[in-house]
Amino acid sequence: MADWVAVVDDDMANLKSAGYILSKRNMKVSAMKSGAALLDFVKSNKPDLILLDVHMPQMDGFETLSLLRKQGEDAENIPVIFLTADEDEETQARAVSVGALGFVKKPFVPDVLVQRVRNTIDLTRLSRQFRSEVEKRVLQILEELEVKPDPEKVRAVLDRL
């Protein structure tokens, strides 16, 4: 199954460039020109990763990410990498503080874009698998101790870790 990336940028040249680079590397790409379009898109779709432009009219990347994280578990767990031409540390610090997993500078360096996307998707998958294995093992241990585990409480505790 091909990795699926949603690219959000108000600049058509950036959408085409990212789409071409990622598609050429066998990734499925869905392109959107606004944060509002992304929020509507994720109501019925779950890409493996979102590339999100920082500066867009109406709703910037920060506001889009904040609203995305409030849409429920499916949307809040999609990893996001910001796209930016900004060089300042303030933008980077703000992006990390709102939950972005990284940055890709514009204009894109094809190999950097592809590797950041692939690495982030791979790490996200590994993290989910690890969490699932930990949850199963904790439930097994509790059962062996003859403690009646509540799977929801176990998940809630793991969420705090």
Image (tube, rainbow, N blue to C red):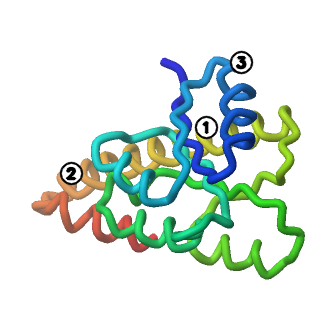
Up-down: is 114 above or below 27? below
Amino acid bearing label 3: Lys
The residue tagged 1 is 122
In the visual, does 116 lie left or right of 142? right
Alpha-carbon neighbours of circle 2 within 10 Å: few (<14), some, or many (≥20)? few
Q: Residue 118: which quarter of the image?
A: top right
Dot 3: what SS? helix
The residue tagged 3 is 24
- For image coordinates 39% across by 41% down, the residue present is 46
The mark nearer the N terminus, 2 or 1, is 1
Q: Residue 113: which quarter of the image?
A: top right
The mark nearer the N terminus, 3 or 2, is 3
Alpha-carbon neighbours of circle 3 within 10 Å: few (<14), some, or many (≥20)? few
Place of residue 104 in the rendered image (x, y in percent of width and height, measured from the top left): 78, 52
Closer to viewer: mark 1 or mark 3:
3
Q: Could you say which disc has been placed on residue 144 in the image? A: 2
Alpha-carbon neighbours of circle 1 within 10 Å: few (<14), some, or many (≥20)? few
Residue closest to the eye, 38 or 22: 38
